[in-house]
Amino acid sequence: MGDGIYIATAGAVAQSTALDVTANNIAHASTAGYQGARVTFSEALAKARSPDMALVGTNTGAVDATSGVITQTGNPFDIALDGPGYLVVDTPQGMRYTRAGALARGPDGALHTADGHRVRNQGGGAIVLPSGATDISFAHDGAVLADGAEIGRLQLATFAPGAMTPEGATLYAARGKPTEAPPPRVVQGALEGSNVNVVRGVVDLVRMSRTYESLIRVIQGYSEIESRAARDIGGPK
């Protein structure tokens, strides 16, 4: 009987985690450059119970790397990445990666993201915008031009599937080195939307909620049976 409670509890915990991840995806459905987390269910062998009993676990480290819809904004400092890959930025924690392309001139004159992270120049360093420049443009290959002259080049990187770990809404850390795959194409005056499908997310929330509630009822049923058995066994003979 205890094994039944153990299995149901593991399933309930997994569903609770999945609910949190799905709700977070829906909350960022309108965040430019957001890539939804993908919940995968796996089986883990119970160590404290019978050796052949499988428990349900979750892995929430996977990032859905499919592209979002690219929308024209008309803002020359907005860029979207067409194809797999990321824009490389400097953060206090080191190099990180993003597809959120709402850029701007920072207080130091360098190119920054909306979150204040400095965009890396290819080969290292910052991309400093000349103070007198009136026309800033981005070429498809990542070259940054000020009044027609190249002043730097966006550092872009692609990674193998499953290499990215989310840090906040639109920032990612990478496991391993970049691949040799071609970098994404830079589209100026546009932003990439979130790749979250809200309708599918809401359907998943309802399904997971019902599964979670069913598992809680199973746990309560097992608990009541065990309590009744304990009373019967320990009662007067």
Image: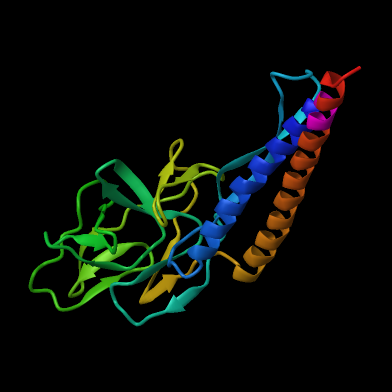
Residue 67 visible here: no
Quarter-of-image position of residue 152: bottom left
For this rendering, which residue is in front, 9 or 184?
A: 9
Q: Position of residue 90 (x, y in %)?
A: 27, 48
Dominant secondary structure, magenta: helix
Rendered view: 218 above or below 71: above
Viewer-nearest residue: 61 or 234: 234
Q: Image check: 102 left or right of 70?
A: left
Residue at the image position 20 percent from the left and 53 percent from the top: 126
Residue at the front extreme of this rendering: 236
Taking the image as drawn, is residue 49 in sight? yes
Image quarter hosting the C terminus: top right
* Residue at 81% in and 21% down: 52
Query: Horizontal and vertical percent for residue 139?
Result: 33, 69
Q: Is residue 39 above or below residue 230?
A: below
Q: Is residue 43 left or right of residue 67?
A: right
Please tell me which residue is depicted at 29% across the width and 41% down the height of the picture: 94
Quarter occupied by the N terminus: top right
In the figure, residue 148 lies in which quadrant?
Answer: bottom left
Residue toward you, 12 or 43:
12
Query: Range of the magenta residues?
Result: 226-230
Residue 83 vertical placement versus 147 (above, below): above
Can you tell which quarter of the image residue 153 is in?
A: bottom left
